Image (cartoon, rainbow, N blue to C red):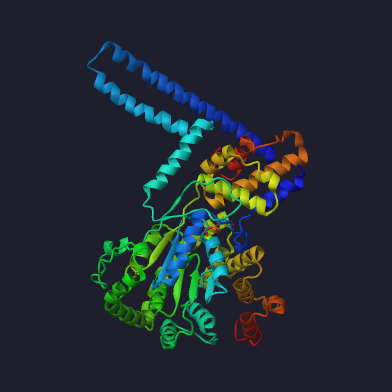
Amino acid sequence: MLNVSELEFKHKKYKRSFYYRYLIIFSVVIIGLIPILLFTLFDEKVEIQTTKQQAIITPIIEEKNDSITQDSNSTLIIVEENISKKEKIIPIIETKEIEDNSSILEEKRVLLTPSLSFIDRIESSNTQHITNVISDIKEVEVENIEPIIEEVKPKEQIIVNNKIESIEKTLPRIEDKKTSINIERKDEESDIADVIKRFNINHNPALSLFIAKKYYQLGNYEQAYNYALMTNDLNNNIEGSWIIFSKSLVKMNKKELAIETLKKYISYSNSSQAKQLLDEITSGKFK
Amino acid sequence: MKPSIYENSRDVFLDTVNAKDYIQLERISAIYDSLKDSIEKPLKMVLLYGKPGTGKSMFLSRLYQNLLPLQKVYLYSTPILDESEFFKTLAQDLYGIAYDGELNFTQFIKILENRELQDTAIPLILLDEAQLYSTAMMEKIRLLSDTRKVKFLIALHKTDKEDIIAKEHFQTRIWESIKLENSSNSELKIYIQKKLMKANCIDTASMFTQKSINLIHKLTDGNFRNANKLVYTLFDIYLYYANTNPSKITKGEVSTKYIEMAAIHTGLINA
Ligand SMILES: Nc1ncnc2c1ncn2[C@@H]1O[C@H](COP(=O)(O)OP(=O)(O)O)[C@@H](O)[C@H]1O
Ligand SMILES: [Mg+2]
């Protein structure tokens, strides 16, 4: 339950500090302006310097006003800014509102950036030189696109073959794998931390399931169990969460509970993956 | 207003992804149309990217729902980590083949190459949260799309790390990338109001005047997820007052103070 009285208190504090800040900025500006005024009045030689100072001070004021005020004047400015920003972006498509009951709408533009820009930025050892096909995809007609692809194709083919070979080569070598696993693991743990952070923010079951699976892979079955459970709380229709949940249970020597869970799930989902796992657990193939 | 109205309005802003709650915004439907175009083009991969909370998952689930009656399409909302599991899932989905043991990349790509397309439309796989796939896995996905027997639409949120993925692994592809942005001021207004109206909360929808929208937009930067959190808390505050001290609720528009309180609670304002 929301603690509203505490929130009210915090809000009061926030408002107070907000006015203080305003006051401080205001007095700084006044104090800063006095010498400038004095200089401009009494010494013409300093003129250049004073204009410089003004230039430094005024933007600060504007910026602050912008971020704080709520009166209608300044919000108008913000809206205008938004629009002008939009228009700086290369517009490709213009659209009209199709939907019915919506309120007032301005014209808006959509940004579709062909990611070809990174093609020419890259110098890679095995790709050598890829043709500089920088074109606006949106504007290329289908007939135009075909020849471009044909042109690139032979090179692609070579790359594909190279890549497959190199992947095949790395797979069977066990020693190689061992060393690379160590390195990977470190990566994975920092990855998990990153994903956990994101999960705590948005409670996306895709993320918690991902975390559960990662933990399972790393052999941390308690955490795998925890996150599978959380996934299941968020959405109990994700097959993967039931599977990881049950597998973790088995790993934690709770085979009976795992079997019970799977049976319950199978009874309403008819999941073939769950059935297979249940078979493997009961027959002792999975332990 | 009855407290239950605030409760219903609050729950409209729970952070869930469900195609039926989709709100059409003109900018997004334009992106949607062009994405549908590019799916039909000979492009092999399409990238959808944008900050968290810009609506990528929502967009994918909508696209999935719409394409489902038209062509073969599959949505993988959760990354399938295990490689063998990934290829087995693909084999199952694309060709209905169930594998018992392991299925590695080389085996799978052979299957793919030997299959004739049954349809005119190439089957489409929608991969959400794709930044979670390993670099090696992304490389293999790229190679799969080279066979032209399957297409991938990849959704990821952009960080420096994903820039690297983009560089190293898709450099040789002619493909299209589409960016989802935070909503503009007027889009946010439509978003909030339509969401409420869809749930029949017309009275609360009309409380969001331009002034309150301006403030919410400033606080959330137009990010859907942040806006959801803020408005959810806002209605929670209203609910509290409706239950304990109804005289504190002023009629008409949303109170600036309550918006700020909600922003403090959700961490959008540091206090
Ligand atoms: N077009 C839309 N219509 C309705 N709700 C949306 C729309 N776009 C985003 N949302 C809401 O915003 C939240 C964040 O969107 P999401 O798709 O999860 O973002 P992302 O995947 O980019 O992190 C979701 O809870 C979703 O309900
Ligand atoms: Mg998402």
Which of the image's four quarters has the C terminus of chain B?
top right
Q: Position of residue A19 (x, y in %)?
A: 53, 27
Q: Quadrant of residue A176?
A: bottom left
User: Which residue is at the front of the view, B88 or B49?
Assistant: B49
Q: Position of residue B45 (x, y in %)?
A: 41, 70
Q: Is residue A94 above or below residue B271?
A: below
Which of the image's four quarters has the N terminus of chain B?
A: top right
* Residue A2 at least partly seen: no
**Viewer-proximal residue, B93 or B245?**
B93
- The structure residue drawn at horizontal position 50% and vertical position 47%, both measured from the top left corner, is B184
A63 lies above or below B118: above
Q: Nearer the viewer, residue B151 or A88?
A: A88
Is A136 displayed left or right of A79 in the figure? left
Where's residue B91, x and y in %? 50, 83
Q: Is residue A251 above or below residue A78?
A: below
Residue at screen point 55% across, 58% down: A199
Q: Is residue B264 left or right of residue B141?
A: right
Taking the spot 48% from the left edge, 80% from the top edge, the residue there is B87
- Number of callouts: 0
Q: Is residue B1 left or right of residue B38?
A: right
In the image, residue B204 lies at what x, y percent?
A: 68, 44
* Res. B151 visible in picture: yes
